[in-house]
């Protein structure tokens, strides 16, 4: 039982990193970047800086919550069922699906809110 509690606390801390980052991006006055190493667009390159920041922040908050739920459900099923390989495959598909969703949302925002797409 102690192992499950430690796992859930670590999962919560990892998820909180994304949630806090999302809140900071939501409140930011200057354009933010989603990916590490990515240079955010300048204010004059965006049609709406506020919408850019709010949607990126919202997406990171949703991702942090979904990550915690996925990790919590994974440990629950790991304790209840025997087929560990199947559970690991489903877990990795869920995690990579969440990351793919985040990247797709970022790409859609770039297409919608950046004036000149030659920037990227």
Image (cartoon, grey):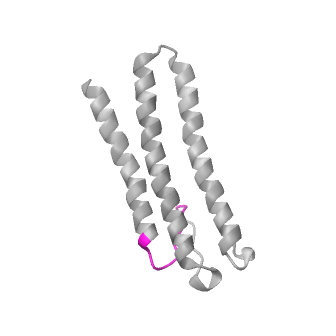
x then y, percent, for residue 13: 33, 47
x then y, percent, for residue 33: 54, 68
Out of 55 and 8, give the one closest to the viewer: 55
Label the magenta part by its dominant secondary structure.
Answer: loop
Out of 108 and 32, give the one closest to the viewer: 108
Q: Quadrant of residue 75?
A: top left
Give the residue at x 58% y 54%: 102
Out of 65 and 37, give the one closest to the viewer: 65
Give the residue at x 61% y 50%: 101
Q: Which residues are magenta?
A: 27-36
x then y, percent, for residue 12: 35, 44
Q: Quadrant of residue 1?
A: top left
78 relative to 107, above or below: above
Image quarter (top left, top right, bottom left or bottom right) of the C terminus: bottom right
Asked if residue 31 lies left or right of residue 65, the reply is: right
In magenta segment, residue 107 = no
Which residue occupies the extreme top position in the image? 82
Question: Number of labelled discs?
Answer: 0
x then y, percent, for residue 36: 52, 61
């Amino acid at each position: 039982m102690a192992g499950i509690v430690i796992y859930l606390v670590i999962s919560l801390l990892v998820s909180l990193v994304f949630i806090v980052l999302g809140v900071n991006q939501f409140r930011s006055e200057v354009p933010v970047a989603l990916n590490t190493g990515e240079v955010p667009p300048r204010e004059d390159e965006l049609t709406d800086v506020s919408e850019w920041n709010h949607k990126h922040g919202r997406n990171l908050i949703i991702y942090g919550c979904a990550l915690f739920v996925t990790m919590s459900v994974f440990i629950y099923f790991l304790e209840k069922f025997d087929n560990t390989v199947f559970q690991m495959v489903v877990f990795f598909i869920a995690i990579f699906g969440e990351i793919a969703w985040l990247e797709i949302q970022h790409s859609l925002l770039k297409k919608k809110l950046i004036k000149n797409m030659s920037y990227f």
